[in-house]
Structure formats: structure tokens, C-alpha cells
Image (spheres, helix red, strand yellow):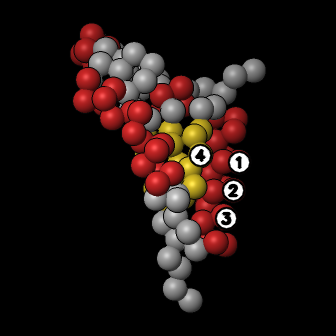
Amino acid sequence: MLINSLIHVLSERGTLGEFNYGQVAGLPHQRPVLDSLAMEHHTATRLDEFEFIVDRSIKQAITTQAPVALILSPLLTAAKSSRSERHGTETKPATPRS
């Protein structure tokens, strides 16, 4: 059985204090491009919902034989937001909230 499903994992850049102007300029186009390709997409913003979103998205992609995009928010990935942070200490990954 050939599976034509494709799971895209994208980082959401250009938001929440993004320091790279090129990323900021591209952000408004990310979801509209996925929509124009008729590609289902989901954004993970919290660690406690991440497993659910990934699991359901993969199952959907396999069942429907259609691609899906998982967008990882900087809230989840603890992305750096400025040049000073890039040259400072490393940021730590997000931890579950109580």
C-alpha cells in the first residue's frame, strides 16, 4: 500500500517579537498559502495540547491520504526574539503549565 500522505512541520516565524524582518514579511502569507493549496493546518501553542494535535493530524493525513501542516508557535518552541538573546544564554524549551 502506497501512502501519499505528507506531514509538514513548520515553525511560526515573524511573530511575537521576531528580530528577522524577512520572517515578519512572510508571516501573513503562511496560512493563506496553505489554504490555497487546500492543505489542512493546525497550530500548536501549548505543550499540553501538542500530543493531541500531532496524533490527530497524522491519523487524518494517513486516513485521507492528504497532506497536513503542523505549525509550531514560538510559545511552544521558546523561540528567541532579539539579537541580544541570540548572543546571550540559550532559551529553554517550554514547560507544561500547572
Three-letter code, disc 2: Arg
Estimate the spatial distance between the alpha carbons at disc 4 and disc 2, rounded to whole Å.
10 Å
What residue lies at 26% left-to-right and 24% top-to-bottom?
20
What amino acid does circle 3 point to? Answer: Lys
Local crowd at mark 4 within 10 Å, few (<14), some, or many (≥20)?
some
Q: Are marks 1 and 4 in contact (CB under 8 Å)?
A: no
Dot 2 and dot 3 residues touching (CB under 8 Å): yes
Tell me where residue 11 appears, x and y as whole percent. 43, 39
Q: Quadrant of the C terminus?
A: top right
Distance, label 1 to label 2, CA atoms, is 6 Å
Q: Is residue 74 above or below residue 6?
A: above
Q: Is residue 82 above or below residue 27?
A: above
As drawn, the label of residue 42 is 4
- Residue hosting label 3: 59
Label 1 sits on a secondary structure element that is helix
Number of disc labels: 4
Contact between labelled residues 2 and 1, with CB atoms less than 8 Å apart: yes
Of residues 57 and 31, the one drawn nearer to the viewer in this rendering: 31
Place residue 90 in its image quadrant: top left
Residue at 35%, 21% (x, y): give it.
Answer: 18
Mark 2 residue element: helix
How far apart in space, not on screen, are marks 3 and 4 (Cα)? 13 Å
CA distance separating discs 2 and 3: 5 Å
Q: Is residue 59 left or right of residue 26?
A: right
Real-space Cα distance between discs 3 and 1? 11 Å
- Label 2: which residue? 56
Q: Residues within 10 Å of mark 2 (few under 14, many from 20)?
A: few
